[in-house]
Image: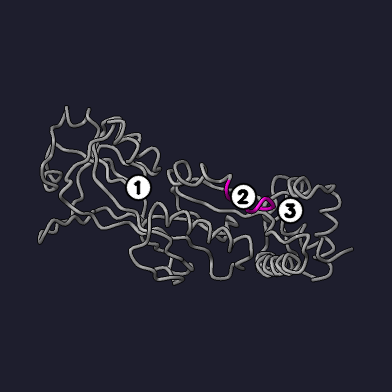
Amino acid sequence: MDRFDAMQAFVRVVETGSFTKAAETLHMRKTSVTQHVQHLEARLRVRLLNRTTRKVNVTADGAAYYERVLRLLADLDDAETSLSSASALPRGRLRVDVPSPLARMLIVPVLPDFHARYPEIQLDMGASDRMVDLIDEKVDCVVRGGELTDQSLVARRIGDLQLGVYAAPSYIERSGLPLHPQELENTHHRIVGFLGSRIGKTFAMHRHEESIKVQGRHVLSIDDGNGYLAAGLAGLGILWLPDYMAKDHLVSGELVPLFEDWRLDPMPLFLAFPPNRHVSTKLRVFIEWIAELMEQHAPKRRHPGMLKSQ
């Protein structure tokens, strides 16, 4: 029995959590996948998976073996890709997670360009604003706005999102037009809150020599960027938005800019991945493609390159 086939079967069982699903994605019989894993366990003399009638869990030994095998298979894939003219393009499955508004407004509309360049890459994209466990969820990389709190990740700053303050006409009609950011504190004005540890609860605003931090009060706080925007458009409160999210709604008149003589600190945009994750060819080209895209929509104010997350 081919050892690499067995390794691939084991990796797919860990990723899918099921022998049946692994067999489907590998286009194999379930009995073949089972035999591959049993062959590995017999060879290694350790139990890699705990099986029950309902689910499959990886053991501690299996988890350690999975990380090593994942890098080994990625190295093999890179070697074959670099040496075979018939396989010159990067290929394989890439799992990424990006903020929901970024996916909807900037990334998904131009994915035809990515797939035209790299037709052999299968992109599995999560579009969310939640905290993702890259190791447990087997995610290759994430794109996130705001400072990264996980010190263990390797991160590349790929952009800076310029921010503005906005409100719907219905909100202004009901609550009035605030003329100074300080009016958002301890008054009848309300903001839409955002749940998430990466994005600060206060916003620094500057005008000439004057600098203040604004927190505001809310009746709704939400953990999804698209929902956050929808709440503001419904008049539920004042929004802090990246330019790319506000642009079309300004043109349509659905949002009105506030405090235009004030400047906000930009929000950094990072792409991050685990330090032990092999940077395969397919991941490398995705990183460069995203960086190229963000250079158009959210150019960096400075270029720190690759760094540990701050």
Q: Tag 1 or tag 2, which sits nearer the N-term?
A: 2
Image quarter in which the C terminus is found: bottom left
For discs 3 and 2, the disc positioned in front in the rendered view: 2
Q: Determine if the magenta segment contains residue 228.
A: no
Q: How is the image coloured?
A: one colour
For discs 2 and 1, the disc positioned in front in the rendered view: 2
Q: Residue at x 56, y 58 (%)?
A: 286
- What residue is pinned by disc 1? 195
| Disc 1 element | loop
- What residue is pinned by disc 3? 51
* First to last magenta residue range: 113-121
Distance from disc 1 to disc 3, alpha carbons, whole Å, reads: 37 Å
Q: Residue at x 21, y 31 (%)?
A: 171
Lateral position of residue 302 relative to residue 305, left or right: left
The amino acid type found where label 3 is placed reads Arg
- What residue is pinned by disc 2? 123
Q: Residues within 10 Å of mark 3 (few under 14, many from 20)?
A: few
| Disc 3 element | strand
Residue 199 at least partly seen: yes
The amino acid type found where label 1 is placed reads Leu
Q: Residues within 10 Å of mark 1 (few under 14, many from 20)?
A: some
